[in-house]
Amino acid sequence: MLTKTIDQILPDTARRLPDKAALIFGGRTLTYRQLEALTNQAANGLKGLGVKKGDRVTLFAQNSPEWMISYHAIAKAGGVLNPVNAMLTADELAYVVKDCGARVLITTPDRAKAVLHLKDEGTLNAIVVIGDPIDGTMSFSELLAGRADTIAPPGNTPDDLSTICYTSGTTGFPKGAMLSQRNVVLNAAMTAAMNVRTQHDVQLTGLPLAHVYGTVVMNLSFLYGLTFVMLEKFDAQQALEAIERHKVTIMDGVPTMYLYMLAHPDFDKYDLSSMRVAVVGGQAMPPAKSTEWQQRVGAPILELWGMTELAGPGIMQHSYCENRLGSVGIMMPFMQGRIVDPADPSRTLPVGEVGELMVKGPFNMLGYYGNDKATAETIEPDGWLHSGDLCKMDADGYFYIVDRKKDMILTAGYNIYPAEIERVVAAHPAVAMVGVGAKPDPQKGEIAKAYIVLKAGAKADAAGIIEHCRRHLAAYKVPREVQFVAALPTTSSGKIMRRELKTLDQDVPAAGQVAELASG
């Protein structure tokens, strides 16, 4: 896999397993033979639009077979992939398209209306829509019409730029992480290896394919000949139904997906016995919920840690190793990791101490597109990459993510990590999910506030939650406020947006819904 490129994934598997089901999406099933032919047609269509080796093509849509076909078609045409979060606004999309110099945009008719002007403002030559075309666009079916279902290899090499993935841009403009062909394919291969995924597995995900985690799961499925069951977007009931109907053996998702499934009132009515493993990443999974999942499903939840800048995971729990709850696992093959002093990254900290996680190896991105300053700030001259995550490592090489540096709460001089509070609150029997955010405080600077979604039919009050926290946390870590809410703000991939939790403060809570802890 060190020398394989994205355009080689489907052809190789289609030769081995031509009639095996490659993709299941709703009522539609495509075999590897069919997927290979469709991606070749689309690649020839893109070449007909003038896409040449190295040209950027932006993908801006929800999960669909057309999105997946486009992804592999871009690689087969020799283009550079630019998968974009489908939740971006028109202005945010315009920034990305202009910044990377996209030649073609593949999107949906409703999204296309807002960005037609981009064809007159830069390098964009064509807009292809998945659905009925509007003026100034062409349909996806037209892209394929009359095109040959074979294509010559584009001549990609492992070191070539394959993908530009833009970060969320929580501060300033987003940065485009440049991923090589090797970054993407090797990460997919090693992710599969860590969970011993084979062609006998049926893989489910509701992750957005535009997110690096979703891309990894898609690519590893096609690389090893799995059957890939894909949801347009995550829905707990649809996921439970899909597991039962298609005898899913492995699922990937973020913590909230599993929490919504566990909280579903009909959870225990579904036959989930086909599941052999569930994999979770994106944010910390509360150990209590991992234990509940295993008890109710009979399959373990294995945690991972990754970054867009690594093309996916960098640390994972291995299916054949001890599953240490609360840990994200061990370093993946070919990768190195160490915990450093945040003030002096040249100093590696002793086992057990909390510092910044740094990683090095062939998953590391090439840099940020057109942004040498940000690249230099993230990648040291010796190749070590700053993760921005606070972490510790035990004596056996298991890593434990403490929290994001930027999410840390500083209260009266004490460092508080939201993930630690969330793990404790999530263990309360009435809690379905929880997010902890910082709230300004005139005396302490900041205090921790917990926003809680209760399980269906469950009852709890704020005082009871705080008392539960007192039994498991040092006094300064106990949340100073608790508020019960109907839902938590999440990203397109389902991760809780801690910075948006404060918007829930505008809701007027029912009596007893908010409690403030006395100072001290």
Image: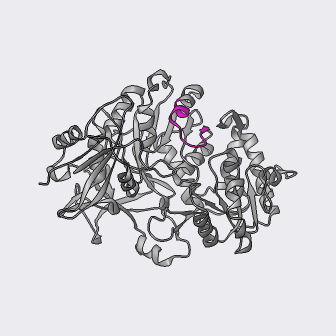
Q: Is residue 55 above or below residue 42?
A: below
**Can the viewer see residue 379?**
no
- Tell me what residue is drawn at x 53 percent, y 46 percent: 207
Please identify the residue farthest to the right as the structure is shown. Answer: 146
Q: Is residue 404 above or below residue 507?
A: below
- Expressed as whole percent of the image width and height from the top left, the position of residue 55 reads 70, 68
- For the rendered model, the colour scheme is one colour
- The residue closer to the viewer here, 334 or 419, is 419
Left or right: residue 357 versus residue 216 is left
Is 229 within the magenta? yes
- Tell me what residue is drawn at x 41 percent, y 47 percent: 488
Is 244 within the magenta? no
Quadrant assignment, res 120: bottom right
- Expressed as whole percent of the image width and height from the top left, the position of residue 88 reads 57, 59
- Expressed as whole percent of the image width and height from the top left, the position of residue 107 reads 69, 56
Left or right: residue 105 versus residue 464 is right
- Expressed as whole percent of the image width and height from the top left, the position of residue 360 reads 42, 63
**Can the viewer see residue 458?**
yes
- Tell me what residue is drawn at x 68 percent, y 53 percent: 72
- The residue closer to the viewer here, 172 or 519, is 519
Please identify the residue farthest to the left as the structure is shown. Answer: 520
Which residues are the magenta region? 228-240
* Quadrant where the image shows the C terminus: bottom left
- The residue closer to the viewer here, 265 or 288, is 265
Left or right: residue 99 versus residue 315 is right
Quadrant assignment, res 498: bottom left
Quadrant assignment, res 288: top left
